[in-house]
Amino acid sequence: MTGDIKEVLLSKETLDKRVRELGAEITADYKGKEILMIGVLRGAVIFMGDLARAIDLPVALDFMAVSSYGTASSSSGVVRILKDLDESVEGKHLLIVEDIIDSGLTLKYLMDNLMSRNPASAKICTLLNKPSRRKIAVDVAYNGFDIPDEFVVGYGLDYAEKYRNLPFIGVLRPEAYKH
Ligand code: IMP
Ligand code: MG
């Protein structure tokens, strides 16, 4: 499987270190509060598991699954909720956890949707960010890494549901797209 990877962009050690930093920052910012972490399925799951363990505060976990209309490479901004949260968010401090922000359209929709449910607060934490691809502004409170406009996999991110379990973030070889 690692033979399909052209280049390791972020090693396991680099990811571990940054996740611990983000956890410490979040712990300091939310001191005395409880956090409801909302993971966006499925890509955020691995990052969220590590991030939750790097936060030294009470955290609850819930999940949403969304799909955006349009093609794989360009989302239209119209988002459909495939799986909604199990619990109410009213009065809670929400931390929305994403694997990567590309156009920003998915998160913009999610943020607006969650804000309409009257949480106490809502912030975004993304592992990766592709600033050059942004179509709509989103306010990102916590960002692991800015990366160039390349298709990456691993640490939760997939190509056709593969590579999510790689312990690093890598760039796929073009040949790997053809299978
Ligand atoms: P957007 O910000 O609405 O354009 O969508 C972001 C979503 O597109 C992410 O949650 C990923 O599922 C997917 N995505 C964007 N870039 C990549 C990539 O480089 N690798 C894997 N998935 C990606
Ligand atoms: Mg995603």
Image: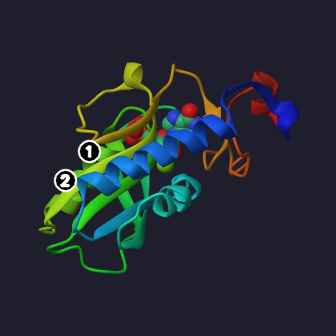
Q: Quadrant of the N terminus?
A: top right
Q: Which residue is mark 1?
A: 108
Q: Badge 1: how crowded within 10 Å, few (<14), some, or many (20+)?
A: some
Q: Which residue is mark 2?
A: 112
- From the top left corner, tell me how far across and down residue 2 is, in percent: 84, 37
Residue 127 as seen in the image, left or right of residue 140: right
Element at label 2:
helix
Report the colour scheme: rainbow
Q: Badge 2: how crowded within 10 Å, few (<14), some, or many (20+)?
A: few
Q: Quadrant of residue 116?
A: bottom left
Number of marks in the rendered image: 2
Q: Quadrant of the C terminus?
A: top right
Mark 1 touches mark 2? (CB < 8 Å) = yes
Say whether residue 127 is visible: yes
Say whether residue 72 is visible: no
Amino acid at the residue labelled 1: Lys
Task: Write the residue at 25% across / 79% down.
Answer: 88
Per the rendering, the mark at residue 140 is: none
Task: Write the residue at 47% across / 62% down.
Answer: 52
Amino acid at the residue labelled 2: Asp
Residue 178's place in the image compared with 58, above or below, is above
Task: Write the residue at 33% across / 52% down.
Answer: 26
- From the top left corner, tell me how far across and down residue 171 is, in percent: 68, 27
Front position in the image: 25 or 126: 25
Q: Quadrant of residue 91?
A: bottom left
Front position in the image: 165 or 72: 165
- From the top left corner, tell me how far across and down residue 133 is, in percent: 40, 23
Element at label 1:
helix
Decide if ligand 1 comes within 8 Å of the CB at mark 1.
yes
Front position in the image: 49 or 150: 49
- From the top left corner, tell me how far across and down residue 107 is, in percent: 32, 46
Residue 160 as seen in the image, left or right of residue 34: right
